[in-house]
Image (cartoon, rainbow, N blue to C red):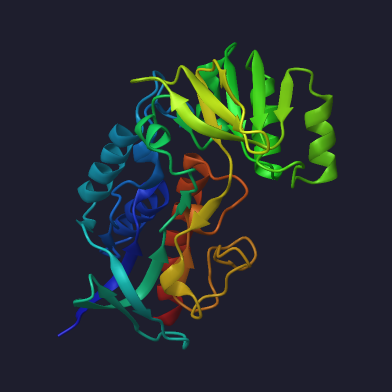
């Protein structure tokens, strides 16, 4: 027999936990399946200094633990598990069927999707080992810690150009490593990069290895045309080669853009399926901050509550 619930939240992180807090306080008795990475992307961030309410800062894992405890205090049932299949009903008031870990069946009146997005990395062993020790995929999250220091940005698109110009305002020197002989960024962003005096762009250049034992001490870069290797002393490495929204199981079911981000209606969190809502980075490729994710989590819970209220 399938378990019947009022509100199912798929995915944890700031969006999921905030949705859970609001849904639980509205007596919707939410059940959350956290996914494989409990707490989401923030658990890979060592220090969080830009989330309101933490005057001395905190770290990503501690913050997610706080949010989980708060959600559970109001009655959220937090479960470790992965949603592997969905069968959403396109009728207003219809029941949505979800399979967890390819075995457990859930029937939910409302579903809030907060599965987030995963930053793309280069895949180097040294890079993976130093995530949180100087390797980051978010300049606006972590750039502050490298004030007055030298950093590297890897990437050639608008995101890389934005991160480089953002970092140039607070760092001593920014070196951009571009794999090809040109940038993919818009002309406007390229002009901004070229006009910023403390940004150096190295074309046809890739990272061979991130240097350092416990923290980043530099990178070994390689020119992919000549094969020449050079060491660049830096304390921070920002990987800006894009994010991949975690929306694979919703393909063909929910409307999404060409890169897989879920589309929501107007200023709401409503998807094209009645009773199914999306919050956080899974539907936001613009801001991607913990505080904006939390805000849309609140919105999703309120949208779900109003949806149920209209059915009564």
In the image, residue 104 sits, relative to residue 147, either above or below, namely below
Q: Nearer the viewer, residue 142 or 201?
A: 201
Compared across the picture, whether 240 is left or right of 187 comes to left
Residue furthest to the left in view is 1
Please state the horizontal and vertical placement of residue 21, each as a whole percent of the image: 33, 51
Which quadrant of the structure image shows residue 10?
A: bottom left
Please provide percent x and percent y for residue 260.
Answer: 55, 65
Q: How many marks?
A: 0
In the image: residue 175, left or right of residue 110: right
Q: Relative to residue 198, is residue 19 drawn left or right?
A: left
Q: Could you tell me which residue is drawn at 75 percent across and 45 percent down?
A: 185
Q: Is residue 181 left or right of residue 291?
A: right
Q: In the image shown, does 211 or 196 lie closer to the viewer? A: 211
* Residue beneath the point at 53% across and 36% down: 138
Quadrant occupied by the N terminus: bottom left
Answer above or below: position of 89 versus 229. Answer: below
Q: Position of residue 112 (x, y in %)?
A: 40, 65
The image shows residue 294, relative to residue 32, as above or below, that is: above
Residue 306 visible in the current orientation: no
Return the residue nearer the eye: 115 or 174. Answer: 174
Q: Residue at 51% of width from left, 37% of height from top?
A: 137
Instruction: From this view, report whether residue 263 is shown above or below residue 13.
Output: below
Quadrant of the image occupied by residue 283: bottom right
The quadrant of the image that shows the C terminus is bottom left
Residue 100 appears in view: yes
Q: Residue 73 placed where, x, y %? A: 21, 47
Q: Residue at x 30, y 36 (%)?
A: 61
């Amino acid at each position: 027999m399938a378990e019947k619930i009022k509100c199912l939240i798929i995915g944890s992180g700031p969006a999921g936990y905030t949705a859970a807090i609001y849904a639980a306080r509205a007596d919707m008795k939410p059940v959350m399946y956290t996914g494989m990475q409990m707490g989401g992307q923030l658990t890979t961030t060592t220090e969080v200094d830009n989330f309101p309410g933490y005057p001395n800062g905190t770290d990503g894992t501690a913050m997610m633990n706080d949010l989980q405890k708060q959600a559970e205090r109001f009655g959220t049932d937090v479960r470790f598990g992965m949603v592997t299949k969905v069968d959403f009903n396109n009728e207003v008031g219809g029941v949505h069927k979800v399979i967890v870990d390819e075995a457990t069946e859930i029937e939910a009146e409302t579903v809030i999707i907060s599965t987030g997005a995963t930053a793309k990395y280069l895949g180097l062993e040294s890079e993976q080992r130093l995530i949180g020790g100087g390797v980051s995929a978010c300049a606006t999250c972590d750039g502050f810690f490298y004030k007055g220091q030298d950093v590297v940005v890897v990437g050639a698109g608008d995101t890389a150009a934005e991160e480089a110009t953002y970092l140039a305002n607070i760092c001593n020197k920014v070196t951009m490593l571009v794999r090809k002989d040109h940038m993919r960024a818009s002309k406007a962003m390229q002009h901004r990069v070229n006009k910023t005096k403390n940004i150096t762009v190295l074309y046809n250049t890739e990272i061979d290895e991130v240097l350092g034992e416990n923290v980043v001490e530099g990178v070994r870069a390689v020119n992919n045309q000549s094969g020449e290797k050079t060491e660049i002393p830096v304390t921070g490495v920002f990987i800006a080669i894009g994010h991949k929204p975690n929306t694979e199981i919703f393909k063909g079911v929910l409307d999404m853009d060409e890169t897989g981000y879920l589309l929501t209606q107007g200023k709401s969190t409503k998807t094209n399926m009645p009773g199914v809502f999306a919050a956080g980075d899974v539907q936001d490729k613009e801001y991607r901050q913990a505080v904006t994710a939390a805000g849309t989590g609140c919105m999703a819970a309120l949208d779900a509550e109003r949806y149920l209220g209209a059915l009564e």
